[in-house]
Image (spheres, rainbow, N blue to C red):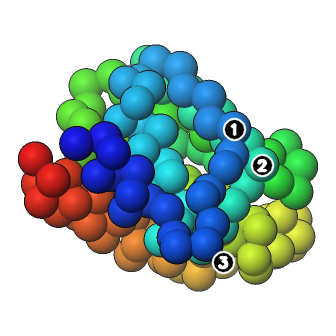
Amino acid sequence: MMFQLMKILTTSTTLMTMNIKIQGLGEKLTQDFVYFCCKELDVQPDSIEIIGDDWAGENTGLCIDLDEKDFLICVAVNDRNLTQIYTTIAHELVHIKQYMKQDLGSLLNKDKPEYLDRWWEKEAREKSLDLVKKFVDILERIR
């Protein structure tokens, strides 16, 4: 099954290589999901570290650009199912795409509209659940 998934995650000419470090979540499935999302979003950061942690608060995820091609994603895991957790990871991966291709970092320092009206949040909300659904569809096909 994993060979079939890796075949789907590669293109005919390029194998995505990036350093992905996972803490507090299932390592293999989460790595496969991150590779899949990055391929779908057409981004290839050098490294992504994802930390699943029990934290209480308003936000369920956070993406930090450590530099141009290295990122940290923190995701809340307490009282959340796998779909919710992976939807948050996908949301934060969309932000990585925005950092890398749309200069999100420079926009965060300017005057911003209300949270729900920010184009980068709208895009992340719109794309995140679709990424999870596509990944699950692939898993269902190769099962």
Residue 135 shows in this picture: yes
Residue 35 x/y as whole percent: 51, 52
Residue for point 33% across, 45% down? 3
Query: As drawn, is 133 to the left or to the right of 18?
Result: left
Residue 54 x/y as whole percent: 43, 18
Do the residues bearing badges 2 and 1 touch, measured as CB atoms within 8 Å?
yes
Residue 59 shows in this picture: no
What mark, if any, has residue 19 been given in the picture? Answer: 1
User: Disc 3 or 2, which lies upstream in sequence?
Assistant: 2
Badge count: 3
Image vertical order of residue 4 relative to residue 49, above or below:
below
Question: Which secondary structure lies at badge 1?
Answer: strand
Question: Which secondary structure lies at badge 3?
Answer: loop
What mark, if any, has residue 40 been given in the picture? Answer: none
Q: Name the residue under label 2.
A: 46
User: Disc 3 or 1, which lies upstream in sequence?
Assistant: 1
Residue 50 x/y as whole percent: 57, 33
> In this view of the protein, which residue sits in the foreground, 17 or 73?
17
Image vertical order of residue 129 relative to residue 111, above or below:
above
Q: How many residues crowd around disc 3 within 10 Å: few (fewer than 14), some, or many (20 or more)? A: few
Question: Which secondary structure lies at badge 2?
Answer: loop
What mark, if any, has residue 113 been given in the picture? Answer: 3
